[in-house]
Image (cartoon, coloured by chain):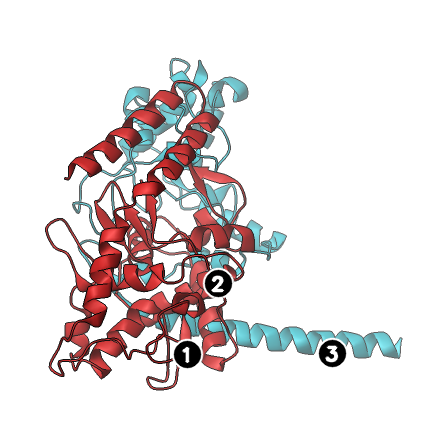
Amino acid sequence: MTPIQRGILALFLAAPAAALAQQPLTAVEEIERYRAALADGNPAELWEARGEAIWKEKRGPKNASLEQCDLGRGPGVVKGAYTVLPKYFKDTDKVEDLESRLVSCMVMLQGFTPEQAKKDPYGSPGKKVAMDALVAYVTSESRGMKMNVATSHPKEAEAYELGKKMFYFRGGPHDFACATCHGVDNQRIRLQDLPNLTKQEDAQKAYTAWPAYRVSQGELRSFQWRLYDCFRQQRFPELEFVSPASIALTMFLAKNSNGGTFNAPSIKR
Amino acid sequence: MKKTLVAAIILAGCAGMTDRSDSENTAKALALMQASFKESGQAKLDRLVQDEVQRVCSEYSGSRPVPKDVAAAIEKSQLATIKYPADGKYLGDWKNGERIAQTGVGMQFSDTAGAAAGGNCYACHQLSKEELSYGTIGPSLYNFGKLRGFTPEMQKYAYGKVYNSEAYSACSNMPRFGHKGILTEQQLRDVTALLMDPASPVNK
């Protein structure tokens, strides 16, 4: 842990504890205040810079960079690309989110096998992965822009509808669905506010804040990771990286956030 | 008269079409999920196989309320699943109950298989006055026993509600802690004591 991380952790541990002695609402406000203060020095910038370097680096069997990758706004256009994802791509005949599109470009442009491109989806202490960095770089290039996800292609419309079904799918030993925690307004789990992801205003606020640097983990976490970890807590089996279900659910949530201003990578506890 | 009938047929036709594409989407979404998850630790793929309550409650969610007859059928079938302690003792140790209410560990693929699980009651409910970090997905249970009376009937109800919440509230968000084997009989007694023991902080 770096001194910065230790400092950030100390702030988070001290602030809510002090506020808890008063009342719950104050604690939530305190957490918001510290989040705002922390946003000034977000370590996600380190991932963004590393991601830009990896984007431009010649890699793989074809010794090519990703600079000609079409992320949805044309080959080589990174600016604003994340605001239109997930999206249907003709070259793969699939709806792809950012992470799956990066995999496709690593395969098509750099000559990696799909297995190689998907091998290290998430970083962990002592193991920095290219995917997290690329996600940080690409998403940072959409900061300040409005989400504008389309469902005009039949496969996009279908992904949205199937993602919606998944959102309400109850299963596992605890009967949990995404909707159990994220389908009603103004609820909390412990002291954590829960966004109602079926409602535009809440979906905008939640979706536009991912990916995020998680202080408690010292890692930059992608939206694929967010879903993977939600399903872990839902007691489901393991959601596979860039699987069709993960993309459909992302489509449902991203589309619900349309019109919201993208503001990530962010920083979270 | 004729107009009304025509309108009714058109409406029925539309409803039929919607239902068909809706059930097609349900099947497609399930197939998509089965192709997208892999077993990990104790979380096997059979967790994606819904029982009847999960299946029906997934359909009646969002803006679609559960019809009264469907709710009654669920509650009846789920009430029949409740296994009460053979000795008729519903209350265990509220202090253990408090510990179970505080922890949410158990049954995730990251958890040790077979280790005792928690109930994580505080994630959704207010219980004791001292614990300020509680959620609001479920109602406040502060003074649960004090408000309802410390009767054997109420002890039995509380035990049954934690055992299988669907028996009393169809499509409730609350896990069926006994029915699904999340908590053991002794743990269920301890949690019931947290709610129903006059000495429990819940009733102070």
Q: Is residue A6 visible?
A: yes
The answer for how far apart the CA atoms under marks 2 and 1 are is 16 Å
Q: Quadrant of residue B94?
A: top left
The spot of residue B7 in percent (x, y) is: 79, 76
Q: Circle 3 is placed at which residue position? A: B10
Q: Is residue A90 above or below residue A149?
A: below
Q: Which of the two discs, 3 and 2, sits closer to the camera?
A: 2
Q: Is residue B43 visible?
A: no
The amino acid type, in three-letter code, at marker 3 is Ile
For residue A88, which numbered disc appears in the image? Answer: 1
For residue A147, which numbered disc appears in the image? Answer: 2
Secondary structure state at the residue bearing disc 2: loop
The amino acid type, in three-letter code, at marker 1 is Tyr
| Horizontal relation, residue A261 to residue A120: left or right | right
Q: Quadrant of residue A159?
A: bottom left
The answer for how far apart the CA atoms under marks 3 and 2 are is 38 Å
Tell which of B20 and A101 is nearer to you. A101
Q: Quadrant of the N terminus of chain B?
A: bottom right
Q: Which chain is cyan?
A: B
The amino acid type, in three-letter code, at marker 2 is Met
